Every structure is written in structure tokens, then in C-alpha cells.
């Protein structure tokens, strides 16, 4: 048996697009982006229709509903190959992206 070993470090990246509905008693206007991020983080995304009553930092009451997730199936896989020519020592490796 050869003393060479081939080690692959693998990373898979898949995109999920989650959809939410936010209903508020007032318009979000000061820091809309951060308000939305904070609001959607408070909803359990276990199943469609999960919802929560939430408040923004500046006191706006909102109902946030998780609606759906779309999976993008053209994910990417990246891997790095390290060739171990001598037991216990790895070269810097060869980085290959697929």
C-alpha cells in the first residue's frame, strides 16, 4: 500500500431564500434594514405560517409571518486537496474549486 494519503476538505454552499410578511401599525422609517433583520430573527421558521408579535427598537409593533422557503438547487461545492507524501506531514495543498 502506498504511503500517500489524499485528504479532501469539502465545503458545500446552498442558497435558501426565505419569505416573510411583516405587518406593522406604523411605517418603518429610521433604520428599515436593521429593523427587518431584527424582526425576522424573532420568528420560528419550522413551518409555513409560523408567526410572532414583535416590536422594533423604536416601539413599532409588528406581526411577522414566515411564509415559505425556496431552495436554489445550483449549489456550489469547493474542495481543497492536500497530498500527504510522508506520514504526518501535509503540503500546503492544492486548492480546487468545482
Image (cartoon, helix red, strand yellow):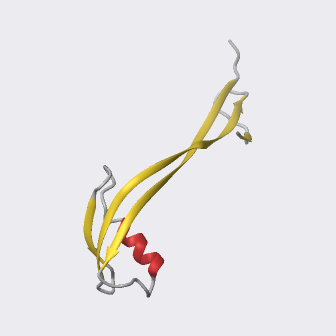
**With respect to residue 63, does 26 lie above or below?**
below
Vertical comparison of 56 with 14: above or below: below
Q: Position of residue 35 (x, y in %)?
A: 40, 77
- Count of numbered circles on the image: 0
Q: Position of residue 69 (x, y in %)?
A: 43, 51
Q: Residue furthest top?
A: 1
- 23 to 7, vertically: above or below: below
Where does the C terminus fall, quadrant-wise? top right
- x 33%, y 83%: residue: 57
Q: Compared with residue 88, is residue 35 higher up or lower down, i.e. above or below?
A: below
Residue at the spot x=29%, y=85% of the render? Answer: 59
Describe residue 37's horizontal placement relative to residue 55 as left or right. right
Q: Residue at x 71, y 31 (%)?
A: 83
Of 49 and 89, which appears nearest the observer? Answer: 49
- Which of the pair 58/26 is nearer the observer? 26
Q: Which part of the image, by quadrant, shows the N terminus?
A: top right
Residue 26, percent from left and from top? 33, 85
- Residue at figure coordinates x 67%, y 27% from the top left: 6
Horizontal and vertical percent for residue 86? Answer: 71, 27
Q: Is residue 6 left or right of residue 30?
A: right
Q: Is residue 49 left or right of residue 68?
A: left
Image quarter of residue 80:
top right
Give the residue furthest to the left: 53
Is 39 or 66 nearer to us in this picture? 66
Amino acid at each position: 500500500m502506498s504511503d500517500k494519503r489524499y485528504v479532501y476538505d469539502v465545503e458545500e454552499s446552498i442558497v435558501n431564500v426565505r419569505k416573510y410578511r411583516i405587518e406593522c401599525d406604523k411605517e418603518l422609517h429610521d433604520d428599515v434594514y436593521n429593523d427587518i433583520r431584527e424582526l425576522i430573527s424573532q420568528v420560528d421558521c419550522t413551518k409555513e405560517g409560523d408567526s410572532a408579535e414583535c416590536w422594533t427598537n423604536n416601539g413599532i409593533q409588528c406581526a411577522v409571518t414566515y411564509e415559505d422557503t425556496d431552495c436554489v438547487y445550483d449549489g456550489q461545492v469547493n474542495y481543497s486537496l492536500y497530498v500527504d507524501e510522508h506520514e504526518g506531514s501535509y503540503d500546503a495543498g492544492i486548492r480546487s474549486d468545482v
